Image (spheres, rainbow, N blue to C red):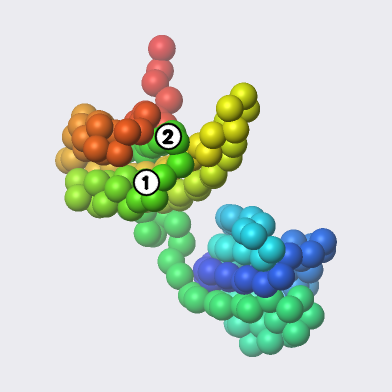
Amino acid sequence: MTTESFLVLSALGPDRPGLVAEVTGYLTERGANVEDSRMAVLGGDFGILVLVSGPAERIAAVEADHGILSDKTGLSVMLRRTKSPEEHRRAAVIPCLVTAEAIDQEGIVRAVSRALHQVGVNIVSLETTAYQAPVTGSPLFRLEARVDVPQATGIARVRKAMEDVAVAENLDIDVRSLIARGG
């Protein structure tokens, strides 16, 4: 039985069509598998964050040849060995979704992330979007974070912390469990 190895590949560079195909093609050609990924255009640049898995020799091939990927795509590529998701997230946690919406203002991400940290919650993923209100054109902001709440902390404590942030920052915040309830 071959043990899986894991690698995080991050890349950033000027946006253009074909980057996803080129990066995933590079990985597939070396026998590596894309486990999880986040990719987005930010300004005029394209950012890629990929969890790659495969037998140790395949992951070593990805590492050894990554200069080829940089040269071909024009992306700045960084690699880092990591643990499997299962190995990293062994603790007893409650997966939750935190959403916040408000008129766009500085400090929203900082306030929410700081309050989550203070109650011992780990942010698993976080996305933000600034956009214009449909009728008024006012600048609005939305934050969506998937978090792991330690069972010892509990969702009620997280909700209280988020209510305090909502009052201080004038936000609408919601915290809900992602565990399906049986019926």
Q: Is residue 163 visible?
A: yes
Q: Nearer the viewer, residue 5 or 93?
A: 93
Q: Amino acid at mark 2?
A: Ala
Q: Nearer the viewer, residue 8 or 172?
A: 172
Q: Quadrant of the N terminus?
A: bottom right
Q: Quadrant of the C terminus?
A: top left
What is the number of the mark on residue 108? 1
Q: Is residue 92 visible?
A: no
Circle 2 crowding by C-alpha within 10 Å: few under 14, some 14–19, many from 20: some
Q: Mark 2 highlights which residue?
A: 102
Circle 1 crowding by C-alpha within 10 Å: few under 14, some 14–19, many from 20: many
Q: Position of residue 169 (x, y in %)?
A: 30, 39
Q: Amino acid at mark 1?
A: Ile
**Contact between labelled residues 1 and 2, with CB atoms less than 8 Å apart:** yes
Between disc 2 and disc 1, whose residue precedes?
A: 2
- Depicted 166 relative to depicted 145: above or below: above
What is the quadrant of residue 13 in the picture? bottom right
Q: Residue at x 30, y 48 (%)?
A: 111
Q: Residue at x 59, y 36 (%)?
A: 132
Q: Secondary structure at mark 2?
A: strand
What is the number of the mark on residue 53? none
Q: Residue at x 62, y 24 (%)?
A: 135
Q: Residue at x 63, y 71 (%)?
A: 12
- Depicted 11 relative to depicted 40: above or below: below
